[in-house]
Amino acid sequence: MKVNKTKIDANKQVAPVSAGALAIPDSPSSPDGLRRYLQDITKFPVLEPKEEYELSKKWRDEGDTAAAHRLVTSHLRLVAKIAFRYRGYGLPMGELIAEGNIGMMQAVKRFEPDKGFRLSTYAMWWIRAAIQEYILRSWSMVKIGSSAAQKRLFFNLRKIKNKIGAVGERGLTNEQAGDIAQILDVTRDDVIDMDQRMSGNDVYLNSAISADGDGEKMDMLVEPSESHEAIMVQREEQQGRQILLSNAMAKLNERERDIINRRRLKDEPDTLEDLSQIYNISRERVRQIEVRAMEKLQKEIVGNAA
């Protein structure tokens, strides 16, 4: 089985090495490759809780790369499952899986087994974050802010439109936009603006300006790209925000963490009614716990960022 050799270092970015490496199957680059990849990753066994805990301790305390290898490979099916949820964005599935695998490695690097929750619960956030960041970088037609509300809108608009039967129409009605805005806690104008951008068509820059074929649209553009240094700084800032959020989430108790995950970080956020039934408490109590948890997160993030 062909592998891509990648090393996890506790203090550095994931980087290729020639020996002593963390080896995982190559992400697929074709339909046949995808089928082979999905077959290959089923060969890695799912870890029992005790075994996962012991391997996590070995990696954290001893830097045991063999332990890290087993932690990552045992969760490759989880990565693929999450990646498939984003197949509607027109990007190669192999690239989505590859980005998700990087998120999985980041999760293993920072996982604290003594916190009392499973690696899969912790890793889901890192996997989704890595895939979503890649999608946002790749979609030429959508330039959105980095706020959580804008990202939630981008990644949930299509699903909610399907649910309310708004697919295939020229545009959302005011009533539909208002309903979606209420569900995702954004403004109606934000919903309409995002829908217009996501419903637009890409313009190929090498297409002709006029019918006679003189010149290309690219010739009329001013070079807008940032320098390599600026891109690296932005990437490091994004990673820093992810780390701050992850560390802050670890400070919450299990119920608070679960409610924040379900209400703020889930692809399709749960409603207050859903959570009130899960925890057998009132919707108002769920809302109070969510508000309190968000205040804790904000205080922790601001304190660590200072």
Image: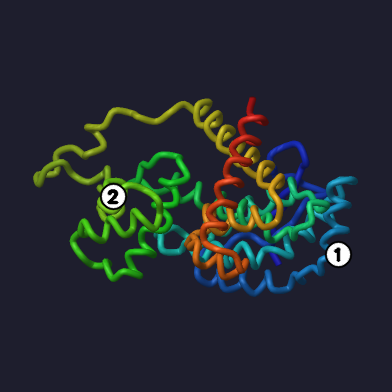
> What is the crowding at mark 2: few (fewer than 14 residues within 10 Å), some, or many (at least 20)?
some
Residue 26 visible in rendering: yes
Residue type beneath disc 1 = Glu
Residue positioned 47% across, 60% down in the render: 92
Q: Quadrant of the C terminus?
A: top right
Left/right of residue 195 with respect to residue 31 in the rendered view? left
Going by the numbered disc 2, the residue's amino acid type is Arg
Relative image position of residue 60 (x, y in whole percent) = 84, 47
- Name which residue lies at 28% across and 56% down: 178
Please state the horizontal and vertical placement of residue 241, each as a whole percent of the image: 59, 37
The alpha-carbon separation of the residues under discs 1 and 2 comes to 49 Å
Left or right of 67? Residue 204 is left
Q: Is residue 83 left or right of residue 76?
A: left
Q: Quadrant of residue 119?
A: bottom right
Q: Is residue 98 visible?
A: no
Q: Nearer the viewer, residue 300 or 265?
A: 300
56 shown above or below 298: below
Mark 1 residue crowding within 10 angstroms, few (<14) / some (14–19) / many (20+): few
Q: Which quadrant of the structure image shows residue 12?
A: top right
As drawn, the label of residue 202 is none
Quarter placement of the N terminus? bottom right
* Tag of residue 51: 1
Of the two numbered discs 1 and 2 in the rendering, the one whose residue sits closer to the viewer: 2
- The first of marks 1 and 2 along the sequence is 1
Q: Residue furthest left?
A: 212
For mark 2, give the secondary structure. helix
Residue 35 drawn at (x, y percent): 57, 73
Residue topped by disc 2: 188
What residue appears at the point 36 percent right and 42 percent down from the top-left corner?
143
Q: Are marks 1 and 2 in contact (CB under 8 Å)?
A: no
Residue at the image position 81 percent from the left and 48 percent from the top = 19
Secondary element at image label 1: helix
